Image (tube, rainbow, N blue to C red):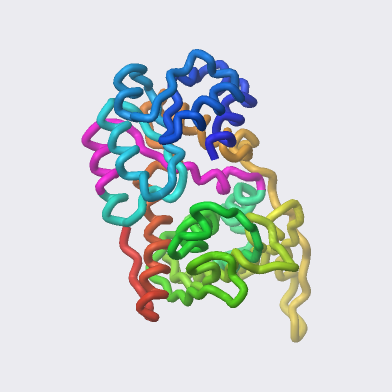
Amino acid sequence: MAKGWLKALRNTPSLREGIAVVGLVDLDRATAEALAAEFGLSGAMIGTDLAAVLAKTRPDILFDIVVPAARRSVVAAGLAHGCHVLSEKPMAASLDEARELRSLADHAGRLHAVVQNRRYIAGVRRIRRLLEDGTLGRLTGLHCDFFLGPHFGGFREEMDNVLLLDMAIHTFDAARFMSGKDPLAVYCHEHNPPGSWYRHGAAASAIFEFSDEVVFTYRGSWCAEGGPTSWESAWRVTGTKGTLLWDGAETFEANIVAGTDGFFRPLAPVSVPAPENEADTHGHASVIESFVAAIRAGRRPETDGSDNIKSLAMVFGAIDSARGRRRVTIAA
């Protein structure tokens, strides 16, 4: 993932001109050296000890791109050295750790935000705007399918709860963002289908209760070959006046009721508006730009930990529900 972040810095003019990479840290020094060479960062300090590099370079920002198990120690180190920290997802390896990091960030007077890059795409922004406009009437439900068969190798294939913990948070966060609602409770069934190349939890189905009587349903698998959805899922969004379908890519279909007669009421197509701000549709680059702008303006960014912990609570609520085979109340 570090390459994705560095490409965003290199390829986005405002980031390229406004941010200097002063250090690269990896447990394997050769990995950091290879990244420095690939991205022309000859002036960056290379090290395997994060605290030592932070103390030497005294950066303003730490980009935390480590595996989830290392998140807490890395974020804490950055905050202790006066850095604002932007982390890969998930925000933490547990809700208790997430709450601790929120406290550490507040105590340090620094920001800790999370790269929810998949809410920074045009489709998600367009749906958010459509729902805010009230075109579909009062929102009643969001329903999505996520079915892919990626063969990552590495740590993902050995994780517990791999789909829910490593990937579903993108979809859960998108549902929260598009709807503008808060998660209240969940019932989830998780399993590892026959033929799965993951050790644990490659598939899950969940029903979430959101505020204002909105229901969000999720069906997903990371070991589903033969009929892939997009990485953004395939969505059906329902309201009191109509329905929106989105394939997770470029195809939208939205219709609203256009009359009061007939067994099935007549429908009329409606257009899905463009994103309110095109600058918010470039994934990693948009998240980083938003984070830097928030630091300069003295405000919290959109994906600040104070907000993102709600998406993480959905993940751990779903995991708890699956383990206990029961409905779980979600509390961030």
- Residue under the image location 54 percent in, 67 percent down: 202
Residue 67 located left or right of residue 328: right
Q: Quadrant of residue 195?
A: bottom right
112 within the magenta span: yes
Q: Position of residue 46 (x, y in %)?
A: 44, 22
First to last magenta residue range: 100-122
Residue 285, compared with residue 319, is above or below; it is above
Q: Position of residue 264 (x, y in %)?
A: 75, 82
Q: Quadrant of the N terminus?
A: top right
- Residue under the image location 31 percent in, 62 percent down: 331
Residue 54, compared with residue 107, is above or below; it is above
Q: Quadrant of residue 147?
A: bottom right
Q: Quadrant of the C terminus?
A: bottom left
Q: Is residue 112 visible?
A: yes
184 within the magenta span: no
Q: Position of residue 235 (x, y in %)?
A: 64, 63
Residue with the most extreme left position: 107
- Residue under the image location 56 percent in, 29 percent down: 6
- Residue under the image location 35 percent in, 34 percent down: 111
Residue nearest the observer in this picture, 150 or 331: 150
Q: Quadrant of residue 325?
A: bottom left
Q: Position of residue 159 (x, y in %)?
A: 46, 60
